[in-house]
Image (cartoon, rainbow, N blue to C red):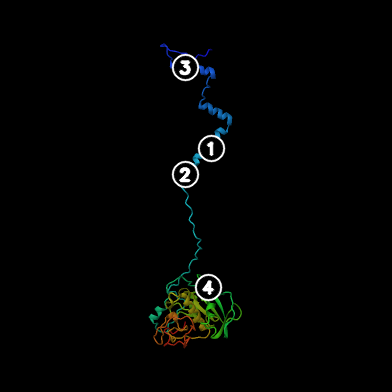
Amino acid sequence: MAVQDPSRVRGAEGTVDDVARARGAVRNTETLYGRRPPQRSTGHAWMRFTQRYGWRAYALPILLVITIVALLTTRSAPKAAKPTARAHVPARATAPPAAAPSSIIKADPAGGDINPKVLAAAALPAGPAYTLKGAGTFRVLKGSTPVVGHGKLFRYSVEVENGIQGVDLAQFQQLVVSTLSNPQSWSGHGVALQRVDSGPIDFRVSLTSSLTTRKFCGYTIPAETSCYDAAGSTSKVNRVVFNVARWMRGSTAYVGDLAAYRIYMINHEDGHALGHQHAHQCLPNGLAPVMMQQTFGLRSPQTGKFCSANAWPYPTGVAGAPGAEQPDTAKNDEYGKGD
């Protein structure tokens, strides 16, 4: 087929017809370069893609969909609350029951009227619960010390009634030993002391429940008391009896200073075990002698003066210590019975 020159094609008016020229150009292009290949549809392209890549062609869109769903789920899901750290709190032991004021195991005749003001001063302060009734038997707490002081030797043990709860026994025995070894206490003033847990024992320092205390000390004075009970009808051994009620709560004379009251308890009751009697008058500087019954108040029954609380037999720098001691009489003891 001959190729026509587009410039020579003319219309009916003898001018070049643009449309005819364009059509001629198209025909000439196909003649020169060949027919344009037909455009393939999207479906045809997908078929070639699947024939080339096989199963992977189907896996790709599935993975894409899964990825999109996972991203949307992660963004929309609420954030989990971070656990709040909590400090470990040890389980609290059940507190022993508090003694009721009307609990009486032994009520001795009072032997006369009791001053209600002094009885009020002897009331047990408010405080933590304590063991009302123990087993009535004792166990020796292990431990011994070298001899302290100079003079006649007294050997003592530290014991606790079985069944007593809520007391730090390590602290209890440490305070007993450190108090009796202090130069302001009895050791070094004519006596020597040694803690032992076996062999010959001169007296036993015992932490005792409220009702068992009344077995040893009686209940002539209707208040929680401690005492020294020499070997005899109520005890086969010399026993210093510390009432756990007082150990836990102290007395009104020492309110706010339980540690000082405990030192007073130790020095006063152990003073009885070492042969000391009660003192009833203030020391020259106004302090109460340690052998005064400070649990029942700080007023001297002989002079009517009020003394200042004092926990030591020989407080540093105080003249006249440990004070004059006399047997209890109706004139110098409101109760007619020692503690």
What's the CA distance linking mark 2 and mark 1? 19 Å
Which of the marked residues, 3 or 1, is nearer the chain's N terminus? 3
Q: Are marks 3 and 2 in contact (CB under 8 Å)?
A: no
Residue designated by label 4: 171
Can you say whether 136 is above or below 38 in the image? below
Residue 75 marker? 2
Q: Mark 4, mark 1: which one is toward the viewer?
A: 1
Q: Mark 3, mark 2: which one is toward the viewer?
A: 3
Can you say whether 150 is above or below 144 in the image? below
Which of the marked residues, 3 or 4, is nearer the chain's N terminus? 3
Q: Considering the numbered disc 4 on the image, is that residue within a helix, a strand or a loop?
A: helix
Identified by mark 3, the residue type is: Arg
Q: Position of residue 166 (x, y in %)?
A: 50, 70
Which of the marked residues, 4 or 1, is nearer the chain's N terminus? 1
Q: Decide which of 57, 20 is in the foreground and name it.
A: 20
Name the quadrant of the N terminus. Answer: top right
Which of the marked residues, 3 or 2, is nearer the chain's N terminus? 3
Inspect this view and state whether residue 7 appears: yes
Within 10 Å of disc 3 (Cα), the crowding (few <14, some 14-19, many 20+) is: few
Residue 23 marker? 3
Q: Considering the numbered disc 1 on the image, is that residue within a helix, a strand or a loop?
A: helix
- Left/right placement of residue 124 relative to residue 60 reads left
Q: Decide which of 252, 286 is in the foreground and name it.
A: 286
What's the CA distance linking mark 3 and mark 1? 51 Å
Q: Position of residue 9 (x, y in %)?
A: 46, 13
Identified by mark 2, the residue type is: Arg
Q: Quadrant of residue 33?
A: top right
What's the CA distance linking mark 2 and mark 4? 59 Å
Identified by mark 1, the residue type is: Leu
